[in-house]
Amino acid sequence: MLKIDPWNIIWTVVNLLFLYWIFKKFLFDRVMGVINQRDEMIQKQFSEAKKSQDDAESLKSDYKKKLESAKTQADQIILDARARAEAEQEKALERTRQEADSMLEKAKADIASEQDKATKAAEAEIAKLAILAARKIVKTGEANDTGSSK
């Protein structure tokens, strides 16, 4: 049967405590130091990853804001260009209208001038014809006067 010896238990406990102390002094402290270093390294990597992620989010947010700003500016530039184009078109139309009006007025003035010239030429021609007719009448009247006095 089993016999329990108290001295055997005491020496076993002393041996276990001694082994615990040796392991603690030479093994556990060093292993815990390595584990702590690795834990710190992992925590540092996590914090750097978090910081990188936050920076990336910040850059993404800035990018979106700049993109929206660029779209707004592009829309404004397009609207300004359209407004300038419409203004230029209106100016061109107005210049064309003014030129057409000016040409019309000049044409009317030319027509009036030609009418005056034609009227004066006709009056001069009528005057010539009237003088010729008067001369013929006078010649015919003289010829009649000379033929009747003979």
Image (tube, grey):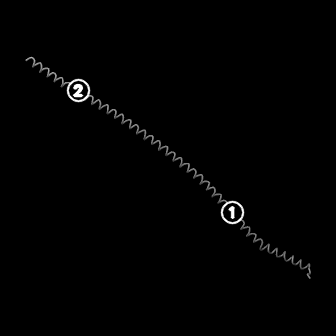
The reply to whether callout 2 and callout 1 are in contact (CB within 8 Å) is no
The disc at residue 46 is 1
Label 2 is placed on what type of residue?
Ile
The disc at residue 99 is none
Residue drawn at point x = 23 percent, y = 26 percent: 126
Tell me if 148 is positioned left or right of 39 in this view. Answer: left
- Residue found farthest to the top: 149
Asked where in the image residue 5 lies, by quadrant, the reply is bottom right
Judged from the image, the secondary structure of the residue bearing numbered disc 2 is: helix
First in sequence, mark 2 or 1: give its number.
Answer: 1
Residue 149 in the image: x percent, y percent? 9, 17
Question: How busy is the neighbourhood of tag 1: few (under 14 within 10 Å), some, or many (20 plus)?
Answer: few
Label 1 is placed on what type of residue?
Phe
Cα distance between the residues tagged 2 and 1: 117 Å
- Residue found farthest to the bottom: 1
Q: How many marks?
A: 2
The disc at residue 126 is 2
